[in-house]
Image (tube, grey):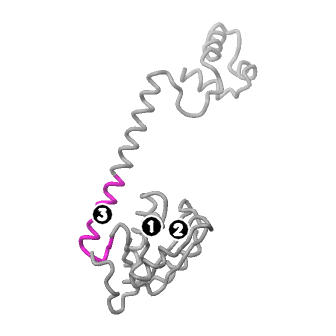
Amino acid sequence: MGLKNAPKTGVRRIGYARISTHDQFLDLQMNALEQFGCNQIFCDEGISGAIHPMERKGFVAAHSTLRDGDILAVWKLDRLGRTLKGVIETVDGLKDGDIQFVSLTENIDTTTATGRAFWQFIGLMAELERGLIRERTIEGMAAARRRGVHIGRPRKLAVADVQQARKLIARDAYTIDGLAGDYGVSPSTLRRALANT
């Protein structure tokens, strides 16, 4: 995709580099971004990838420097964030300002038609993966329920307690309010348990 080409006239290349711990070094990233022709490079040191880019001083400074037509460059996608979803949201947010994006290691370059198509493909794959995870989660929860596994917060009342309460109420031996106090729950909790067990 020609990532090593010199910047076009009037197009600024802004670099962003990040290391997670202070015992890591920025040299590799800085050298790659300088070779790419970045006019300025902004850095975050000792900052986890789990922290949103807009909560990092270096990235915020880089972002505020970007103007329409500029290119934001990183050494690798994971310099922007830990999850593909987060990286995609950050890069897609650049489009609002007509900012292009380049990741040197993955050879992603949204200044080209091929690079834009590849980036869209990555987004589609990420969405497909999220959909599959959702489906597997729903299927897993349904299978667990069929096996009698309770999903969600722990029950305040055991099934045996609810069954006993139902028998006592049916005999008019207790009221819901009276039983709820004995079990240490609110009347509404006991009513829900009786309705759902």
Magenta stretch: give its range.
108-127
Q: Residue at x 36, y 54 (%)?
A: 126
Report x, y in % for residue 96: 40, 74
- Mark 1 residue crowding within 10 angstroms, few (<14) / some (14–19) / many (20+): some
**Amino acid type for the residue under numbered disc 2:** Pro
Query: For this rendering, which residue is in front, 159 or 75?
Result: 75
First along the sequence among labels 1 and 2 = 2
Amino acid type, label 3: Gln
Q: Amino acid at mark 1?
A: Thr
**Mark found first going from the N terminus, 3 or 1:** 1
Indicate the quadrant containing the C terminus: top left, top right, bottom left or bottom right: top right
Q: Which mark is residue 196?
A: none
| Residue pointed to by mark 2 | 53
Which residue is under mark 1?
A: 90
Question: x, y (%) of residue 128?
Answer: 33, 50
User: Is 15 or 90 nearer to us in this picture?
Assistant: 15
The one nearer the camera, 114 or 76, is: 76
Residue corresponding to mark 3: 120
Give the residue at the far bottom of this rendering. 9
